[in-house]
Image (spheres, helix red, strand yellow):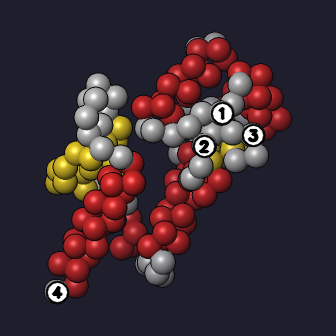
């Protein structure tokens, strides 16, 4: 895969997930070149990817960095833990994060955000904020059921 193809694939993936992409091809190449990890990018825990700080905000200069997929996953879990505003033990967090959360289905014009918690279908929503709220509510309901 050429760099141009990889850039296009990354940009397309961000769009499908409903994440803004504000990087030009030249900025994207400069970030990868500065990291020195272009030849080690790809899938797998020890391979490298471009991640967003705190797993939030758009892909843009100053908000992205290159790290291993494992580090990116840990950063996401850290951000998720802070988002829950409580201390979460690793075992509980691993169970909670086994879900897919919300996904953006671009073929659907109305209610393109689909929410799923594990294998349980929660529903479709018009906005990302509605989908995230439904996902949070589903997690809270599941955790309350576990405690009871």
Q: Are marks 3 and 1 in contact (CB under 8 Å)?
A: yes
Reading the image, the residue beneath label 2 is 58
Earlier in the chain: of badge 3 and badge 1, it is: 1
Reading the image, the residue beneath label 3 is 61
Relative height, residue 84 to residue 51 (above, below) = below
Residue that appears at 71% across and 25% down: 24
Closest to the observer: 142 or 49?
Answer: 142
Instruction: State which mark lies toward you, 2 or 4.
Output: 2
Closest to the observer: 141 or 77?
Answer: 141
Earlier in the chain: of badge 4 and badge 1, it is: 1
Relative height, residue 71 to residue 37 (above, below) = below
Residue that appears at 43% across and 38% down: 17
Does residue 30 appear anywhere in the picture?
yes
Does residue 36 appear anywhere in the picture?
no
Quarter that holds the C terminus: bottom left
Where, by quadrant of the figure, is residue 22 drawn? Answer: top right
Residue that appears at 36% across and 57% down: 132
Earlier in the chain: of badge 4 and badge 3, it is: 3
Reading the image, the residue beneath label 1 is 22
Earlier in the chain: of badge 1 and badge 2, it is: 1
Where, by quadrant of the figure, is residue 133 drawn? Answer: bottom left
Cα distance, mark 4 to mark 3? 46 Å
Task: Give percent across and percent down for residue 49.
Answer: 61, 38
Earlier in the chain: of badge 2 and badge 4, it is: 2
Q: Are marks 1 and 2 in contact (CB under 8 Å)?
A: yes
Quarter that holds the N terminus: top right
Task: Give percent across and percent down for residue 51.
Answer: 62, 45
Cα distance, mark 3 to mark 2? 9 Å
């Amino acid at each position: 895969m050429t760099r141009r193809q990889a850039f296009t694939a990354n940009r397309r993936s961000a769009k499908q997930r409903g994440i803004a992409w504000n990087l030009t091809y030249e900025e994207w190449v400069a970030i990868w070149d500065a990291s020195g990890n272009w030849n080690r990018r790809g899938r797998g825990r020890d391979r490298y990817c471009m991640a967003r700080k705190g797993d939030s905000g758009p892909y843009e200069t100053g908000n992205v960095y290159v790290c291993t997929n494992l580090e990116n996953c840990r950063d996401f879990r850290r951000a998720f833990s802070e988002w829950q505003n409580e201390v979460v033990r690793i075992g509980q967090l691993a169970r909670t994060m086994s879900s897919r959360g919300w996904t953006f289905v671009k073929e659907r014009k109305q209610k393109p955000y689909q929410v799923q918690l594990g294998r349980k279908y929660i529903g479709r929503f018009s906005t990302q904020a509605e989908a995230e709220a439904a996902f949070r509510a589903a997690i809270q309901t599941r955790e309350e059921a576990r405690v009871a």
